[in-house]
Image (cartoon, rainbow, N blue to C red):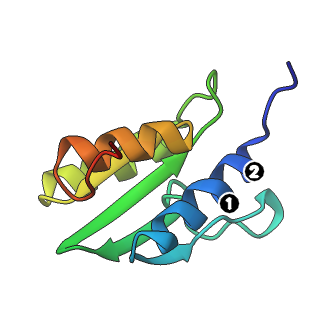
Amino acid sequence: MRRQPEAAIRRAIRELLKQLGFAVWDCEQNRATRQTPGLSDLIAMGHGRILFIECKTPKGRLSDAQHFFGAEVERNNGVYLIWRSTTDAWDWLVERGIVEEAS
């Protein structure tokens, strides 16, 4: 089975969130122009929530800057998520009653 690159995971999560009524900003920065180390890949607003989402491959790890950013979000009562697939996203949204599980 071929490994899905992080960019493809990010696009799939972004599209899922848009389909579910979220406004989504893609904050991905390539290494050459990175201005804000640690900033989450996606920011999503909808259903009364603001989500800061870091997209990773199944084995992807957070950088020190990403750990710091996530801790700052949480320290300020924000929601910082690390999703590795649309399944992660869907399960989190269902668990919180934001979307209903398909029957």
Percent x, y for residue 53?
44, 54
Residue at x 75%, y 52% (from the top left corner): 7
Residue at x 51%, y 53% (from the top left corner): 38
Percent x, y for residue 14?
57, 64
Q: Which mark is residue 11?
A: 1
Q: Which mark is residue 84?
A: none
Nearest the viewer among 17 and 41 is 17
Left of 27 or right of it: where is 95?
left
Residue at x 29%, y 50% (from the top left corner): 93
Q: Which residue in the protein does label 2 denote?
A: 8
Percent x, y for residue 79?
24, 55
Q: Quadrant of the N terminus?
A: top right
The quarter of the displayed image where residue 44 is located: bottom left
Q: Farthest residue toward the right?
A: 2
Kindly identify the amino acid type of the residue bearing the numbered disc 2.
Ala
Left of 33 or right of it: where is 67?
left
Left of 5 or right of it: where is 62?
left
Residue 21 in the image: above or below residue 13: below
Which secondary structure, mark 2?
helix
Nearest the viewer among 75 and 46 is 46
Kindly identify the amino acid type of the residue bearing the numbered disc 1.
Arg
Residue at x 21%, y 69% (from the top left corner): 49
Percent x, y for residue 15?
59, 66
Which secondary structure, mark 1?
helix
Residue 12 in the image: above or below residue 27: above
Label 1 environment density (alpha carbons within 10 Å; few <14, some 14–19, many ≥20): some
| Separation of residues labelled 1 and 2 (CA atoms) | 5 Å
Residue 46 in the image: above or below residue 65: below
Residue 98 in the image: above or below residue 2: below
Label 2 environment density (alpha carbons within 10 Å; few <14, some 14–19, many ≥20): few
Task: Please report contact status of discs 1 and 2: CB closer than 8 Å, yes or no.
Answer: yes
